[in-house]
Amino acid sequence: MSMAQFAYLIFSHTNPTQVLRLAKAIRRSSRFAHIVIHHDISKSRLHVPDGAQVHLIPNPVAVEWADFSQVEMFLHSTAWILEHLAFDWLVVISGQDYPVEPLADFEARLETSGQDAFAEHFPALTAATWPKHTGERRYYFRYCRVPRIAHYYLLPESLKRRLNGAKSWFNDAQPVVTIRTGPRKIPTQVGLRRLRVPFNGDFVCYGGADWFNLNKKSVRKIHEFVIDHPRVVNHYRSTYLPSESFVPTILLNDPDLRVFNDSCRYVAWEGTSAASPRIIRASDLDKVFESRHPFARKFDENIDADVLDLLDARIETMQESDGRS
């Protein structure tokens, strides 16, 4: 059993019953951990019953996908945790994650690793996991939103495809202006290449996943960086999908931090250009188990609730066989 104090921070905005189920699953597997939820009440309401043993982040941030508000949510939540909770390790997950196996081995691995963080990372400009020029187009351009086209949804699909093709041709034809028509109904954004960026040979731009495992030292270091480097923070405010670069860039450029390149999550992607992971179903569980990761994402009880039942049963059986239940 780990002697370190763990905190699990859940970022959620939808499926409130699934979020509460996730909190219960973590509690069954990590009896003494802090469970903290930041739920975006602008998207849905989360009612936490009495005795649920969870902390709700007060004054939650209204989040828009691909916007700096995702970073603000992280900073707002971790600032509250630093002030109010005693912890050694913080595990950041989404409301559509779920534990795949008992968490005791995972917690022991972090505690004894000698690392300060477990986080996926790669140089953003040369990332093989992203389509070509993704890092450059995201973080070396200044973006602004443009008004939505009224009644765009009424256009014929053939015309929409032609417009999308024209956009792709325009973006590929020159390196100065880029147009992004993102998924999830986010507004179209136009990016203009910046003349100056904060990145150089001594301060490299990194990319990575939004989900991290951070010890208290690394969480404090992130907040110290935010205070000491307002120019970098302001730069990220007008980038595209800053949450997939902001934290990895801070961690990897700090010589005092040891960062292991592993987010400890199983994620199923349809391809490198997919905007969101594929929903995991019961038929996918063999691949999930083969990964040996403690968490997987993402799940949706409205699409396949049986898979969560199977995971609960698996973890209960494993804990009983280990004498941990």
Image (cartoon, rainbow, N blue to C red):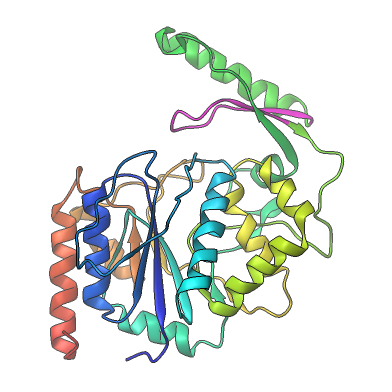
Q: Is residue 185 magenta?
A: yes
Residue 307, position in %: x, y? 18, 56
Q: Is residue 202 left or right of residue 315?
A: right
**Is residue 45 something that shows in the picture?**
yes
Residue 226, position in %: x, y? 69, 61
Q: Residue at left 61%, top 61%?
A: 247
Q: Is residue 202 magenta?
A: no
* Residue 65 vertical placement versus 286 (above, below): above
Q: Quadrant of the C terminus?
A: bottom left
* Residue 249 vertical placement versus 316 (above, below): above
Q: Residue at left 42%, top 87%?
A: 4
Q: In the depicted view, which residue is nearer to us: 101 or 81?
A: 81
Q: Quadrant of the N terminus?
A: bottom left
Residue 23, position in %: x, y? 27, 64
- Report the label total: 0
Q: In the depicted view, which residue is nearer to us: 174 or 265?
A: 265
Identify the image quadrant of residue 207: bottom right
* Residue 143 vertical placement versus 16 (above, below): above
Q: Is residue 285 left or right of residue 138?
A: left
Identify the image quadrant of residue 11: bottom left
Segment colored magenta: 176-191
**Is residue 133 something that shows in the picture?**
no
The residue most toward the right is 195
Residue 95, position in %: x, y? 34, 54
* Residue 175 vertical placement versus 266 (above, below): above
